[in-house]
Amino acid sequence: MQTNFSEAALADPAMQASEAVIRKCVHCGFCTATCPTYVLLGDELDSPRGRIYLMKDMLEKQAQPTQEIVKHIDRCLSCLSCMTTCPSGVNYMHLVDHARAYIHDRYRRPFQDRLFRALLAWTLPHPARFRLALRLARLARPVAPLFDKWPALRPLAAMLKLAPARIAAKIPDPQRLSATRRGRVALLQGCAEPVLRPEFRAAAIRVLDRAGFDIAVPEGEGCCGALVHHMGREEASLSAARRNVDAWMREMDGAGLDAILITASGCGTTIKDYGFMLRNDPVYAEKAQRVSAIAKDISEFLATVDMPAANGHGLVVAYHAACSLQHGQKVTEAPKQLLTRAGFTVRSPAEAHLCCGSAGTYNILQPDIAGQLGQRKAANLDRLEADVIATGNIGCAMQIGQRAATPIAHTIELLDWASGGPAPSSLKHLEKGYSHDPHHARPGQ
C-alpha cells in the first residue's frame, strides 16, 4: 500500500514502524474472511483491511481522530486472526496498538466511556483492588438488567454480569514435593487470574514440580500491562513492562532462569512483545529483548519436557484455542499434543480460529458484539459433546464458562489431574470413581 507520511511524521519512531506495517498491506482481503467483526457485521470498515485504511488516513495526516474512526478501531478485538491469514506478513498488532495510543492521546471520549475505561485501568491490573471491586459487584448484580436498558450503561451492566457469584479464596503456592531438580523458571503471578481462578497457578506449580523445576517468585513482579496497553494507555503499559523486566532481570542475573512461564496467554503475547515495546528505550531495550526471548506459554514449555506418566480418565476434551495463543504467539499444537499424551481424547470445534469475544476488556466495553461471539463459540464447543472444554486463557475461561453447557478448565488443570493432582473445580462431579492409575479406564469402558 502506498503511503504519504511527511518527513516530520516519520521522525517519530512509532510513525516509522506503522508506516512500514501499512506499506506491507496489498489489499488482498484474505483477512476479511477470518475477522470476527467482519463475519458478524459485514462492514468493510470493521475488517482489518478497512481499519488499515482508516488508520493510514488518520496517522498520515496526523489528524484529530473522528468518532467514526474511533468506533471502528474500538470494535477491533485484537484477536490477530488477520495476522495468521495475511500472506504479506502485515503486523496488524503493532499498527492497531499505535493507533489506540494515538487515539487515547488525542480524542476526548464521552464522559461515561472515559469513566469506565479509567475504572478498568485503575482496578483490573491490581489484584487487591480487583478483589474488592468483585465484592461490590456482587451486591450490585440485581440492578444489572436495569443498566442494560441504557446503551451508555451497558458496559457497567456487563461488568456486573461478569462478576462471579463467589469470590475465589486465595490459594498459597503448593509445597514442592519432587526431589529432582532440572531447571529454574519464573511463573507469572498475573493480576486478574489469581483473583478469578487461583487454582490455575496452583495446578501449574504442581505440574512443574513433578517435572523437576524450581519456581522463582521475583520480587516486584506485577501485571504484564496488556490490559492498559490495549486501551491505548501507552505510558502505563510501558511502566508495567519496565517493572517486570527489572524483576525478571534480577533473577536472570542472579540464580538464573531457564524460562518465564505464563498461564494466561493474553499476558504471554504482550510479554513476548516487550522487546518491541521498549525498543526505543536506551536503558531497557536490550534487557527487554532478553526477557521476551525466554518468555513462553506454559504449554509451549511443557511440550519440550519429559512429563511423568498420566491418566486422562478416558475424558473427551473440546480444545478452545485462545486467540492470543494461536494467533498472537503461534502456539497451536502444543496444548493439544500435551492433552493427547496425557490420555485425553481431544476434539477441535468448528470456527476454531474465531474469537470468543473476551479479548481483555472487550466483553465489557463492547458487550453486544462480545455476547454474540461468546454464544457462537460456546455453541460450537457444546456441539462436540465433550466432557470438558480446555483453554489456556483466563478471559476465555470466564467468557465461555458463562455460556457453555460443557464445564471448562485450564489445560494445565487437566494435565495436573492426569498426573496425580486434584480434579479441576469444574469437574469435581467426575472425581469420584477415578483413580490416578494410568491403566484405569473411565467407568463404563
Image (spheres, rainbow, N blue to C red):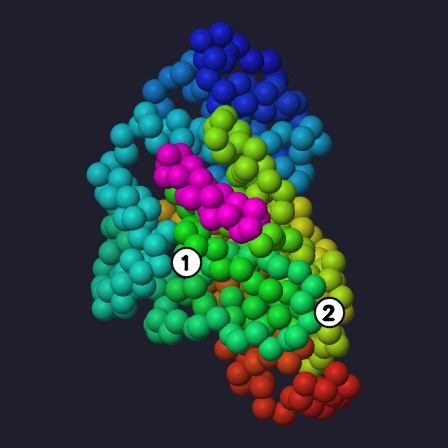
In this view of the protein, which residue sits in the foreground, 260 or 216? 216
Identify the residue under disc 1. Answer: 192
Q: State the SS at label 2.
A: loop
Say which amino acid is labelled 2: Met
Q: Residue at x 56, y 63 (%)?
A: 215
Q: Position of residue 220 (x, y in %)?
A: 41, 52
Residue 395 image offset from top left, x and y in percent:
47, 57
Residue sitting at the far front: 254
Mark 2 surroundings within 10 Å by alpha-carbon count, few (fewer than 14), some (14 through 19), many (20 or more): some
**Residue position marked by numbered label 2 in the rendering:** 307
Residue 396 falls left or right of residue 182: left
Q: Position of residue 47 (x, y in %)?
A: 54, 35
Stretch in magenta? 230-254
Q: Residue 139, relative to residue 399: is it above or below?
A: below
**How many circles with numbers are drawn on the protein?**
2
Q: Quadrant of the C terminus?
A: bottom right
Please say whether residue 113 is visible from this viewpoint.
yes
Q: Is residue 234 magenta?
A: yes
Q: Main secondary structure of the magenta part?
A: helix
Q: Is residue 172 placed above or below 90 in the rendered structure?
A: below
Which residue is found at the position 72% from the left and 87% from the top? 437
